[in-house]
Image (cartoon, helix red, strand yellow):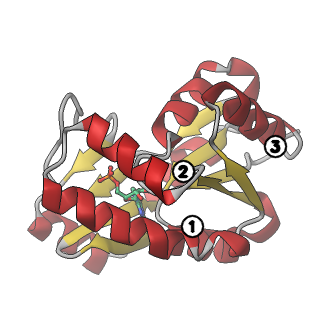
Amino acid sequence: MNKGKIIILSAPSGTGKSTIISRLMDNTDLRLGFSVSATSRAPRGAEVHGREYYFLSPEEFRTKVNNDEFVEWEEVYAGTCYGTLVSEVERVIDSGRNLIMDIDVKGALNVKKRYGGQALSIFILPPSVEELERRLRSRSTDTEESIRKRLDKAELEMSFAPQFDVRIVNDDLDRASKEVEDTIKSVIE
Ligand code: 5GP
C-alpha cells in the first residue's frame, strides 16, 4: 500500500489557517487525516480533547518527551509546549491517507527535514501585520498580553517563510483555500 503524503501547514496565529484546514478536511478527494497534536496549554473556547488537541498537563507532556513519543515538539510559547505524536503520524500515513499538520515554523522545518520528498511544507501569510492584529483582536478569546505575544511571534515566524516549499497569502479566504487545495492536489497521487 502506498504511504500517504505529509502536508505541513504553518502560519502566524490569526491568519485563517484553522478555517482553511477545516475546508480542506471537508474535501474527501484529498483523503486527509488531521494530526491531532498534544499541548500543555488549557483548552480555549469550544476546544475538545482529542479533536483540536490532546490537552496534557506539563508533567504528562514531559513524560511523553522522555518516552520518545514525539516526532517533534517545541516550546512554542514560553512555558507552553506543543508536539506531534509518533502514534498520530503512523495512524494516518499507514492507512494510506495524507496527513495534514498544523504546527509552528520550527516544528514544520524539522518534519520537512525528516520526511523530505514525502512532505510538503506550506506557509500561509497574512496580507500584512496590521491586518493580522485586527483579526486577532476581533477573535477576542485572548487577553491583551496573549495578543501581544502572538504578534511578536508572528513577525518572527514570517521571517521563516522563505524556507517553506510554498507560500500562500490569505488576502481572500476562498481564493487562498483554493490555492492550498490545488497545491496539495499537485503532490498527492
Ligand atoms: P494555538 O495555541 O493557537 O492553538 O497554537 C499555537 C501554535 O502552536 C500554532 O502556531 C500551532 O501551529 C503550533 N502547534 C500546534 N501543534 C503543534 C505541534 O504539534 N508541534 C509544533 N511544533 N507546533 C504546534
Q: Determine whether the beta carbon of the residue marked 3 sits less than 8 angstroms from the nearest atom of ligand 1.
A: no
Other-residue count near label 2 (Cα within 10 Å), few / some / many at <14 / 14–19 / ≥20 = many
Instruction: Work out whether 84 lies above or below 30.
Output: below
Q: Amino acid at mark 1?
A: Ala
Residue 164 vs residue 1: left or right? left
| Residue 70 visible somewhere in the drawing | no
Q: Amino acid at mark 2?
A: Met
Q: Residues within 10 Å of mark 1 (few under 14, many from 20)?
A: many
Q: Earlier in the sequence, mark 1 or mark 2?
A: 2
Q: Circle 1 — which element?
A: helix
The span from disc 3 to disc 1 (Cα, nearest Å) is 17 Å
On residue 57, the disc is none
The residue pinned by badge 3 equals 183
Cα separation between marks 1 and 2: 8 Å
Residue holding disc 2: 101
Alpha-carbon neighbours of circle 3 within 10 Å: few (<14), some, or many (≥20)? Answer: some
Q: Which residue is mark 1?
A: 108
Report whether the residue tagged 2 is closer than 8 Å to ligand 1.
yes
- The residue nearer to you, when weighing 66 against 14, is 14
Of the 4 image quadrants, the one containing the N terminus is top right
Residue placed most toward the observer, 158 or 54 = 158
- Identify which residue, 84 or 26, lies in the foreground: 26
Q: Quadrant of the rendered structure where residue 81 is?
A: bottom left
